Amino acid sequence: MNNVNEEEQKYFDYTITSLKKEQDYYHEQMKEIPKKYTNTLQGDAFLVENLMSITATRLRQLELAKKSPYFGRIDFLTNGNGNIAKIYIGKTNINGENNKQIVTDWRAPICSLYYDSDLGLASYDTPIGEIYGDLKLKRQIIIKDGKLIDVFDTNIVSTDELLYPYLKVNAGTKMKTIISSIQKEQNRIIRKPFSSNIIVQGVAGSGKTSVALHRVAYLIYNLKDKIKSNQFMILGPNNCFLEYISSILPELDTEPVNQKTFIELTNDLIGEKLTIINESDIFNSKDSVSLKNIHAFKTSLEYKKALKKFIYNYIENFIVPNDFILDGETIFSAEIIKKILFSTSNSKPSFEKAYNYFVNYFKENIDNIYDTLNEKYRKIYISLPIGNPIRQEAIEKSTKLKNLVKNNGINILRDYFKKLKLKITDIYKLFIENIKDYSDYLTDSEIEKLQKNTILYLKKKKVSFSDLPALLYINYILYNKKFDYKHIIIDEAQDYGFFHFDILKNLFSDCTFSIYGDLAQSIHSYRSINDWESVISNIFDGNCEIIKLNKSYRTTTEITNNANKILYQMNMDIANPVIRHGCSVKFSENSKNNEYKINRINELIKKGYKTIAIICKTEKESLNVYNSLKKSNINVIHITGKQTKYNENVVVLTSELSKGLEFDAVIINNASNNIYSKESKIDMNLLYVASTRALHELEILYEKQICDVFNDINTIKHKTLKKQIIKSENIYNR
C-alpha cells in the first residue's frame, strides 16, 4: 500500500532539485579552485589541495545521498518556541535555497528523537544542555533508487512492522548500514559519550557490529574538531570479517579508520611476519584436555606474571654486551655500552638510543679512532728502512685498518647492535625454554608439551592466538612504543583471554574502549574469558559499563527460537525474536547425501537467494564438502583463514569463520549427535554460531541421530521459550 501524500511528494521533489543544484555548484568549484590560486607558492599549493579535497568529499556525500536523501521525519515543538520544526533525517546534511538545511545528518543531536522518543513530551541532549519540547510527529519514509515509495507514521504502525522492509532483504557480501532502522537500545550505545568504556553483550543478530561501526561514525562526526578518524582502531577476528564490514564507514561518510586483526597488530608492533596456526586440532585431539590447559595458561594473567619475571631477569642477565672491538682493540667497553643502553627510566633498554649515540660518536671521531688503532702499525713502519718485509707488512695492515674503520666501521657497529637486540620471538623462545623457572602452574608433562609445540611452531614463524599477548608484552616492556590512538573498538571479543585485554589496555593506556561480543559464541572458551564482570574488575578497575542487546533482528522468529534451545542448554539469556516469520527450520537426514545438497542448493538459488552457506564444524570437513560440491555445476567458494573476499555465491566455511557474517540461507552440514555433544560447551558455542547466520532459511543436516539439543523440548522449563517454540514451529514432525 502506498501512503505517499502530496506534501511528502512535494518535499521530496524539492530535496532532489536542491541536491542536484548543490552538486552542480561543487562541480563548478572543482574547476574554479585551481584558477583562483595561480600563485606557485607552497602555501597556495597546500591550500588548493585542501580545498579540492573538501569539495571532493562533499560531492561524494551528495552522490551517496542521491538514491535515498532521507529516511525519516520528526516534527518537534521546542518549549517556549511557537514554531514546529520539521526535521528530515538522512545520511548527510543537504542544503536548499539561501543555504537553508533541508535534510539533517542522522548524527545531529536533535535526530536522537527519531530513534529514542515516542510522540508527546520529549527531550534531547546538546552540548549546551537538554532541550525539552513536544514531539508531534515521527514518520518513516521509504525511498529507493531516487523514488519516494512509501510513508509510515510510527504511532500507527508497530515497531516490528516498521522494521520489516529492512529485515526481509537479501544478504550481500558487504554489511549494510542501519541508520534508517536503528533501535532505541542500539542508539543508546551509538551515542554513548566518547569518554565511556563500554562492553556490549549482544545475542547473535542483535546488531553488535553495526552498532560498533555506527558509533565510530557518530563519534568522528561529533568530535571532528578534536579527534581524527585515524585515531580510531577496529580489531576484528579475521580478514574475511574486516572485508565484509569494509563498506560501512565509507557509506556513512567517514574517513578511513584503522582496521586490523590481532595477528596483524602483533606483526606491526614486533616487526616480524608471523602466521596463526589452526586450532581445530584442539577440538579433536586425544589429548585435548592437556592442550586446552596450555592455551588457558597462555591467555591468563598468571602467564603474564611468569613472563614479567623472566623479562626483568633477561634484562639484567641476558643483555650483557661485550666490548665493541676493532682490530683486537676495545673501542667501546661493555660497561659504557650498558650505561648508555639503560640510561632511560624504568630500567628498560633503549637499543635505538644507544645505537644512535655510538654511531654518531663513531662518525664524529672516526679519524681519532683510526689514528689510535693505527699507532701500533705506524710505530713499526716509521722505525724500519724501506724494503724491510716487517715494515711492508705493517703498511699493509695499516691500509686494511683504514678500510675497516672508515669504510666498514659503521656497518660493523650496526651488526653489533643487531646481535645485541634479539627478535621478540627469540626472546619468547628463551622464556619458553626456561619457563619451569618462572611458573609451576602446569604439570611437568604439560610444560614439556607446551615447550615442544611452541618452539616447533616458532621455528616455522607460526604462533597460536594464545601466544600473541606474550609477544606484545615483551615488546611493550622492552620498547614501549607510544601511540596516537584515542579509541579502540574490539569486535568478537568473547574469544579474548584476560592477557589479551590486559596488553591492549597497557599498549593503549590513553584510549577508551568499545568492546562487543557474545559469550554464547565463545568457540574458544578453553582460552577465553567466562564473564564480562571479571574483565571490568581485572582490566578496567570498574571503570566500564556492560550493556545488553537481547533482541535478534537478523533471523526469522523460527530460526531465533531454534537457536534459543542452544542458549537454554548453556544457561544463557535467550534472544527475543523480532516478529518476522518465515519457513520452519528444516531437519534432514542427508548429511552424507551430496546429490541432496546439490538439489537443495539449486532450490534455494531459484528462490532468489544471493548468498548461501554450508557451515561445517572443522576445516577438514569443510574442505571435503567443498571438493564434493565443486564437481557439480554449482559456483562454490571455499572460505579459509586466508580468504578475504567472497562473491554472491554458494560458500563453504567453518562455524569459526562464519562469526559476524550473515547469509540468506544456511545449511549446517552435519549436526549429528556424535559430532555436537550438548554436554560440550565448545560444541554448543559452535552450533549456536552456525544456527544464527541465516536471514531467511535454515536447514540442519544430520546422520542417524540429530544433536540432542534440538530434541529435548519436553525438558525445556523456560515457559516463554517453550511457548514460542510450540507456537511458531513444528520442527519435530520431520
Image: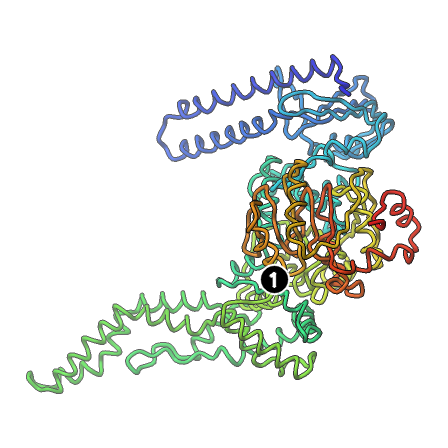
In this rendered view, identify the residue nearer to me: 135 or 312. Answer: 135
Q: Which residue is mark 1?
A: 620
Q: Position of residue 473 (x, y in %)?
A: 59, 67
Colouring scheme applied when the structure was drawn: rainbow
Quarter of the figure with residue 628 = bottom right
Quarter of the figure with residue 448 = bottom right
Q: Position of residue 648 (x, y in %)?
A: 59, 41
Q: Decide if residue 648 is on the left or right side of residue 530.
A: left
SS at mark 1 in the image: helix
In this rendered view, identify the residue nearer to me: 623 or 142. Answer: 623
> Mark 1: few, some, or many residues within 10 Å (few <14, many ≥20)?
few
Query: How many labels were placed on the picture?
Result: 1
Q: Decide if residue 227 is on the left or right side of residue 358.
A: right
Q: Position of residue 59 (x, y in %)?
A: 53, 27
* Amino acid at dot 1: Lys
**Which residue sits at x=72%, y=46%?**
208
Q: Decide if residue 421 is on the left or right side of residue 129.
A: left
Quarter of the figure with residue 359 = bottom left
Q: Position of residue 160 (x, y in %)?
A: 81, 34
Q: Decide if residue 24 is on the left or right side of residue 199.
A: left
**Which residue sits at x=78%, y=41%?**
583
**Which residue sits at x=93%, y=50%?**
719
In this rendered view, identify the residue nearer to me: 599 or 220. Answer: 599
